[in-house]
Amino acid sequence: MHVSIVLPTYNEKENLPLVIQKLLDVFDNHHVKGNIIVVDDNSPDDTGKLADRIAEKEHRVQVIHREGKMGLGTAYIAGFRHALENNMADLVFSMDCDLSHDPAYIPDFIDMHLKGYDVVVGSRYIAGGGVENWGMHRRIMSKGANLLSSTILGVRVKDMTTGYRCYTCQVLKEIEMNSITSNGYSFLEEVLFLCNKKGFAIGETPIVFIDRTLGSSKLSKNEMWKFFLTLMRLKIKR
């Protein structure tokens, strides 16, 4: 089993070396054949240059440089395409580069895939999952958005907005990534919607999400507004 980890970055200079080292440790300790694809959007803090220096010393790290901040969704797509075009993996993961997604869960995702799931979602809202360092307001907002999204779109997943996921290459080939029009965090709900529509088996594995301690959050009111607009657009397509 070979895995590719797609890491979109924008001003993650403090976190990137820590995340990469944790990923490499998981690969080595669990005998996982893996590689890491950093997709950097020309970070002003020189995250991309740091990624290049790491890649020079570690052959399991590749770096994709983009001209500017083009959004989370297109960053994931760029990484997915790179993995597919270079036949780099059986499973392709997406995860955040802010230490909120613990690489230690990767073997759990692989185990779920081996049980027959095409898509595995790291869920905060099933038994064993949770969040840390969130206030009550953010917890209510997140749970409400996930309940609304899964109900309206008819996707039986409790955590529609998590970015910690893995997909088989077959899934990424068939969901027609060129057709995805949303970007940012709303990209996450659209991908699951398409996976469900294609009939792929979607499973959830529990994760504990730890809010970032270094750097600043990328979530904005504009992202939340786009999330709900995407939800309405996909409802019409259902």
Image (tube, rainbow, N blue to C red):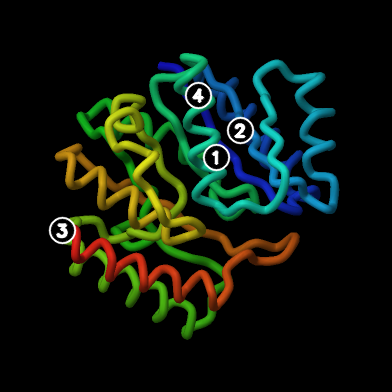
Q: Which mark lies nearer to you, 3 or 1? A: 3
Cα separation, mark 2 vs mark 4, equals 17 Å
Q: Position of residue 17 (x, y in %)?
A: 76, 39
Cα separation, mark 2 vs mark 1, equals 6 Å
Q: Residue at x 76, y 53 (%)?
A: 11
Relative to 70, say whether 112 is above or below. Answer: above
Q: Residue at x 19, y 68 (%)?
A: 152
Q: Position of residue 127 (x, y in %)?
A: 29, 58
Q: Earlier in the sequence, mark 3 or mark 2?
A: 2
Q: Which mark is residue 83?
A: 4
What amino acid is at disc 1?
Pro
Which of 164/8 is in front?
A: 8
233 with respect to 86 (left or right): left
What amino acid is at disc 3?
Arg
Q: Are marks 4 and 1 in contact (CB under 8 Å)?
A: no
Q: Residue at x 70, y 63 (%)?
A: 213
Q: Position of residue 74 (x, y in %)?
A: 52, 46
Q: Which residue is mark 2?
A: 23
Q: Which mark is residue 238?
A: 3
- Residue 107 position by quadrant: top left
Q: Position of residue 55 (x, y in %)?
A: 76, 24
SS at circle 3: loop
109 with respect to 62 (left or right): left
Q: Which residue is mark 1?
A: 103
SS at circle 2: helix
